[in-house]
Amino acid sequence: MRAVLVPLAIDPAPPPPGSVLRRAAGTSMGTDWSVRLMLPDGVDGAALARALQGELDEIVAQMSHWEADSLLARYNRMAAGSWLALPLQFFEVAEYALRVAEDSGWAYDPAGGALVNLWGFGPSGRYDQAGFYAPSPDAIASVLARRTGGRPVLDREGRRLLQPGGAILDFSSVAKGYGVDRLALRLEAHGVRHYVAEVGGELRGAGMKSNGEPWWVEIEGVPDGGALSEQPVLALHGLAVATSGDYRRWFHHGQRRASHTLDPRSGHPVANDLASVTVVADSCMAADALSTALTVMGPDEGLAFADARGIAARFLVRRPGALLETTSAAWRGLLQ
């Protein structure tokens, strides 16, 4: 029997009379984005679509680790002891990412870009290109040792970020979710209250369709995970969802799968047999970052962390020929 997740509070207000179902779409952050919405009468859909693309373009300009002239890339090149003044979007992402890092005991590290690059998951020297070799233990130890210069320090009152020297920011585990949130905020600023927004498979929704049904989405499964019952479906009503999985970018390293999710504490890809972690939260930025943090922690530590903080999370663990599902109390609280 398929599991169904429904938010604990539902706003029954329907779309305004005269609203029509519309779709806007484009590309950003190396993937596709799309929005389905009930467009109220009098709202210019073409202008709204341009505004949505503009939101994502601004995030790329500020936070891309692929663009050499992005604000993030400029921070990564700054001298030790330098401060970078932050625009609002960059500040919001840095503030939340560093908060999750501290709360998780740095199982999640937004300044772990040097490790990401070393393992071939950055913009150059990639794992899927000719000539790539997995890093040696000495190379890993060298990258970890360079962190002794300190971690980025956020001056919240001054809205600026300290470069301690050699810190390499990588917001790839949070910026996409934040982009979904920015799409949602732009829609609401244009008077749209009934929508589902998606960037690269991460989603946030609100309201309902004209027939009174919520925006139903299927929770992402594991493509190579073997037989599993039907995936749960979620009523995306005032909620966001993101999944971190070991099947997206990986390569064989000895007898193990070297996933793009790295443990910043050890310097190695996670090796806890987690195939995926899905998080449902109020914001997509939170779902994005927390799904990565829980993946690094593993099924036991991660589940305890989620339960202690009321995080709705689903863990799929690889076992011979099957997947083992475990869920947090908050996840089970959404089940209907």
Image: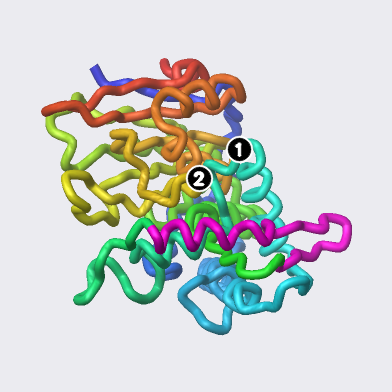
Q: Position of residue 134 (x, y in %)?
A: 28, 62
Query: How many marks do you count on the picture?
Result: 2
Q: Is residue 335 magenta?
A: no
- Kindly identify the amino acid type of the residue bearing the numbered disc 2: Arg
Q: Is residue 196 left or right of residue 9?
A: left
Q: Residue at x 28, y 51 (%)?
A: 258
Which image quarter is the N terminus in? top left
Whether residue 26 is visible, yes or no, is no
Q: Is residue 320 left or right of residue 283?
A: left
Vertical comparison of 67 with 208: above or below: below
> By what rule are the colours in the image chosen?
rainbow
Q: Residue at x 39, y 36 (%)?
A: 277
Q: Dot 2: few (<14), some (14–19), or many (≥20) neighbours within 10 Å?
A: some
Pointer 2 and pointer 1: residues touching (CB < 8 Å)? yes
Q: Which mark is residue 265?
A: 2
- Kindly identify the amino acid type of the residue bearing the numbered disc 1: Gly
Q: Which mark is residue 105?
A: 1
Q: Residue at x 58, y 52 (%)?
A: 181
Q: Position of residue 211 (x, y in %)?
A: 42, 36
Q: Quadrant of residue 218?
A: top left
The span picked out in magenta is: 138-163
Q: Could you tell me which secondary element the residue under label 1 belongs to? A: loop
Vertical comparison of 284 with 69: above or below: above
